[in-house]
Image (cartoon, rainbow, N blue to C red):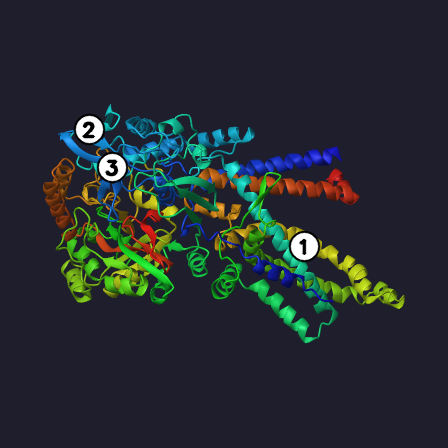
């Protein structure tokens, strides 16, 4: 008895490999996460935002290094201490042919002001911050008043996608966007198909104000598995992928059939020490918490920083793709301090500092961190633990999934009262992305003293407190003049980082891999966009 | 009979009630979805607003009652991330998973039965040893690894197969099916084969064992003595008898295959319910996780109920036992 059937089927399948339309300019991108919704006000998850950015635009765009550039607004300036004027671009069309006017901007504001019911991210667009009030002056002029000087208006608005009043007014949030009915934007690409879990397709919008887009059609194919995503690129299923696995980077760079694009990210990876009087995870040889907490001594924090070999992490773990840091925003960002160089690896000095601080034999710590959030996070944790143990600080690693890690990092006990969060960890590796390309909120968020009422220090999970920084941070938030603000920020950052408010490790480096013949202008903010990809062959 | 069914139905409802409690509270003690959705610039009022938007500001008991109330009306809530009813997401993706599982089943049978027969017919021939070694490997090597190796070999090195995703689909009775298009089959081949391996190994082993047993039975000897052609002896008389245990085991295994599909779906980016569940867990999309688990519970309870009823119809002893106990 013979069974040749499977062979025949396989042969038939091979013969019928999908025929692609050659005359069409299609870009297929293998992305890490699927887009969960086409409603730009729904989640703010990066997997959603980057797809939506093709369809919806903002008043203020961001350059590849996240600096504000004209978007739907042509220009903006403060006309009074507490009032900004935005001049809108004229002649912009929505995808269905209607004109874009100030009414759409006001409508977007109204949609978000009350919060979109059920939308987890709608409060995160920061419309209430600074007490913003929007006012239409004429069809192409908008005034936004605040309760005081508000320098980062453009940065805030660069986060806010504008939707079409006529399409969205009666639409059901999320649902009607996913069918395409309300997914009417002004961007270079129009909604074509949203197939949950499978793919999102957008097509060129010929009447785009910025000229006809480069690609006829762009397909976003989610491939969560790193190695499968790389395989999809290698065999041509997709033209380009984000987050190529770092371990395969050296081969990819050398392969003439592929191109790798690289840019330092706005995401700083750092270790946050806890500053409470007693920290549960900082113990002596008997396992008892040490009083007072050694991390309150800046010499100990500096020792921990000097004990980290950042170059080794870059070369051995990150495949060369990281930027060792002491700054809190990457080069090119508003607030980057020229003189702040990453600490060089110096275990001897680290040991001296520990001895000087009264811990010649070190102590025991638990280092917490996520294992599925940042590039190679779990491996960095292990490396840091080994390096610390080498100078006598015996380190145990506790890595966990991000969905558990962040609630413990930020809030601590699940039962704590909102507004009275008690961060749980004594030493935790986390990351901070300066999305707006501007350091004001990075300083305020990570260095300022925690204050639930003002929002200061909302990312200060170690509860670091330094009045010299607080004064400068509060002042920076009210300083409209750019040079003056920059000087204040640089001072605050220098004070904070010389005091080791936290221990920076590196900036992640964003990478993309694509087939040869494509050129990519990579973005600091990790977004993968077809607008930045062009054909060079 | 009616009493038996009513009693079974009540038990099923009890199981369902207990499961809703376990699933709902179990999912709600893990992490906090708010911090997944809040950007780093989100301050306390913003966090509180998100908590309110997600309905997490109410005490958990109240959340549970609202959930039960809605469930009784057939509404399992809206997904946090997708913003659409969780059940519609499940229905949308279930065909992809079922399609994958059925194709795996078919492959397991089409390949496993002949190989098992061959191994049973000539147990000491070298081909049998190869087949049995293959079944051993297929049984013990992790699905995850096999999937990746298949991708490396067939997609990357040979370039024959697409590595990820689902191919073109056609709509049949409202469900999107891909095995009716060539592109779809092309995409289906690797994941379905990967998923089928464990079942295939089991079919091979069961077939071989059955063959060894049945071939020496009297009725086969008589059939041969009767001059019936070998092909008919094997195809009808032997096959019919060894199929019974195979069908029983495969029936039980099928549920496990849908569960294993989670792994295969993640490797091959197959847009099925398994991958959806994994994604939902990663962002703590509680309503979607709960809805999926409740859906699975309902499915299993219903299937068990049907099986029980069928058994009691087929085997009077079950019914009698039920009445007396």
B152 left or right, relative to A524: right
Residue A156's label in the rendered image is: 3
Q: Are marks 2 and 1 on the same chain?
A: no
Subunit ID for the residue under disc 3? A
Quick one: SS at disc 3?
helix
Q: Are marks 1 and 3 on the same chain?
A: no
Disc 3: CA contacts within 10 A as few (<14), some (14-19) or many (>=20)? some
Q: Residue at x 38, y 40 (%)?
A: A205
Q: Secondary structure at mark 1?
A: helix
Q: CA distance from mark 2 to mark 3?
A: 13 Å
- Disc 2 vs disc 1: which is toward the camera? 2
Side (left or right) of A434 relative to B5: left
Mark 2 — residue?
A146
Quick check: A323 above or below A196? below
Distance from Cα at disc 1 to Cα at disc 3: 60 Å
Q: Residues within 10 Å of mark 2 (few under 14, many from 20)?
A: some
Q: Tag 3 or tag 2, which sits nearer the N-term?
A: 2
Residue sitting nearer the eye, A393 or A41: A41
Instruction: State the separation of the CA atoms marked 2 and 1.
Output: 70 Å
Chain of the residue that carries numbered disc 2 in the rendered image: A
The quarter of the picture where the C terminus of chain A appears is: bottom left
Residue B181 visible to the viewer: yes
- Note whether A138 is above or below A237 in the view shown: above
Q: Is residue B90 left or right of residue A336?
A: right
Q: Quadrant of residue B203?
A: bottom right
Query: Helix or strand or loop: what does disc 2 sit on?
Result: loop
Residue occupying image coordinates x 32% and y 53%: A368
Identify the residue position indicated by label 1 in the image: B249
Q: Position of residue B93 (x, y in %)?
A: 53, 43
**Placement of the N terminus of chain A among the 4 image quadrants:** bottom right
Q: Name the front one of labels 1 and 3.
A: 3
Which quadrant of the structure image shows residue A258? Answer: bottom left
């Amino acid at each position: 008895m013979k069974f040749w059937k499977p062979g025949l089927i396989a042969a038939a399948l091979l013969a019928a490999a999908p025929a692609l339309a050659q005359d069409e300019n299609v870009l297929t991108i293998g992305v890490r996460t699927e887009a969960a919704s086409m409603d730009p006000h729904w989640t703010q998850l990066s997997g959603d935002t980057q797809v939506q950015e093709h369809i919806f635009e903002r008043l203020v765009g961001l350059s590849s290094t996240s600096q504000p550039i004209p978007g739907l607004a042509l220009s903006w300036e403060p006309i009074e201490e507490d009032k900004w004027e935005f001049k809108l671009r004229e002649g912009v069309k929505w995808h269905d042919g209607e004109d874009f006017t100030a009414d759409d901007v006001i409508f977007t504001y109204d949609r978000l002001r009350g919060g979109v019911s059920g939308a987890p991210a709608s409060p995160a667009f920061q419309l209430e911050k600074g007490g913003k009030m929007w006012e239409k002056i004429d069809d192409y002029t908008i005034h936004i008043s605040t309760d005081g000087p508000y320098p980062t208006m453009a940065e805030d608005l660069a986060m806010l996608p504008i939707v079409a009043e006529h399409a969205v007014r009666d639409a059901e949030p999320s649902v009607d966007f996913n069918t395409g009915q309300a997914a009417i934007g002004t961007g270079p690409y129009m909604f074509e198909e949203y197939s949950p879990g499978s793919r999102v397709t957008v097509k060129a919008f010929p009447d785009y104000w910025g000229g006809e887009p480069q690609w006829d059609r762009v397909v976003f194919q989610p491939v969560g598995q790193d190695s499968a995503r790389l395989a999809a690129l290698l065999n041509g299923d997709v033209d380009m992928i984000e987050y190529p696995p770092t371990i395969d980077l050296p081969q990819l760079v050398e392969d003439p059939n592929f191109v790798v694009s690289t840019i330092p990210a706005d995401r700083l990876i750092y270790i946050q020490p806890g500053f409470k009087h007693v920290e549960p995870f900082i113990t002596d040889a008997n396992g008892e918490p040490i009083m007072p907490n050694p991390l309150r001594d800046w010499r100990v924090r500096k020792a921990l920083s000097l004990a980290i070999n950042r170059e080794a992490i870059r070369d051995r773990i990150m495949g060369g793709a990281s930027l060792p840091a002491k700054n809190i925003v990457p080069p090119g960002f508003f607030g980057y301090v020229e003189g702040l160089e990453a600490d060089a690896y110096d275990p001897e000095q680290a040991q001296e500092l520990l001895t000087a601080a009264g811990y010649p034999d070190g102590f025991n710590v638990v280092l917490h961190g996520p294992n599925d959030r940042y590039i190679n996070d779990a491996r960095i944790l292990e490396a840091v633990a080994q390096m610390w143990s080498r100078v006598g600080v015996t380190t145990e690693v506790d890595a966990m999934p991000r969905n558990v890690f962040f609630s413990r990092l930020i809030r601590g006990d699940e039962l704590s009262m909102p507004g009275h969060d008690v961060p749980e960890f004594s030493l935790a590796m986390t990351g901070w992305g300066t999305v707006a390309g501007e350091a004001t909120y990075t300083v305020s968020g990570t260095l300022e003293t925690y204050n639930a009422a003002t929002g200061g220090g909302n990312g200060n999970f170690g509860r670091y407190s330094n009045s010299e920084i607080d004064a400068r941070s509060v002042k920076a938030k009210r300083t409209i003049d750019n040079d003056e603000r920059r000087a204040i920020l640089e001072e605050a950052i220098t004070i904070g980082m010389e005091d080791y408010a936290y221990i920076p490790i590196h900036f992640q480096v964003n990478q993309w891999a694509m087939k040869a013949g494509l050129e990519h202008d990579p973005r600091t903010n990790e977004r993968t966009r077809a607008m930045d990809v062009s054909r060079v062959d | 009979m009616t009493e038996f069914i009513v009693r079974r139905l009540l038990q099923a409802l009890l199981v369902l009630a207990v499961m809703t409690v376990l699933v709902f509270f179990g999912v709600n003690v893990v992490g906090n979805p708010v911090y997944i959705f809040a950007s780093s610039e989100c301050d306390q009022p913003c966090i509180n607003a998100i908590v309110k938007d997600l309905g997490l500001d109410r005490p958990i008991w109240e959340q549970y009652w609202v959930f039960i109330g809605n469930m009784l009306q057939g509404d399992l809530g809206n997904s946090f991330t997708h913003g659409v009813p969780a059940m519609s997401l499940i229905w949308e993706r279930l065909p992809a998973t079922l399609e994958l599982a059925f194709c795996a089943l078919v492959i397991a049978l089409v390949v496993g039965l002949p190989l098992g027969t061959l191994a049973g017919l000539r147990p000491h021939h070298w081909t049998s040893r190869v087949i049995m070694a293959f079944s051993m490997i297929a049984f013990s090597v992790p699905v995850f690894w096999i999937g990746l190796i298949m991708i490396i070999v067939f997609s990357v090195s040979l370039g024959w197969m697409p590595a990820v995703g689902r191919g073109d689909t056609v709509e049949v009775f409202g469900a999107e099916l891909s095995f009716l298009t060539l592109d779809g089959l092309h995409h289906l081949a690797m994941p379905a084969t990967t998923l089928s391996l464990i079942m295939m190994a089991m079919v091979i082993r069961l077939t071989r064992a059955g063959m060894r047993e049945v071939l020496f039975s009297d009725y086969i000897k008589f059939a041969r003595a009767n001059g019936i052609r070998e092909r008919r002896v094997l195809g009808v008389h032997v096959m019919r008898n060894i199929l019974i245990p195979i069908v029983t085991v495969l029936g039980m295994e099928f549920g496990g295959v849908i569960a294993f599909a989670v792994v295969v779906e993640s490797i091959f980016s197959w847009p099925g319910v398994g991958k959806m569940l994994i994604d939902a867990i990663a962002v703590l999309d509680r309503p979607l996780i709960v809805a999926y688990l409740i859906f699975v519970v309902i499915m299993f309870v219903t299937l068990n109920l049907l099986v029980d009823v069928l058994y009691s119809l087929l085997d009077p002893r079950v019914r009698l036992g039920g009445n007396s106990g």
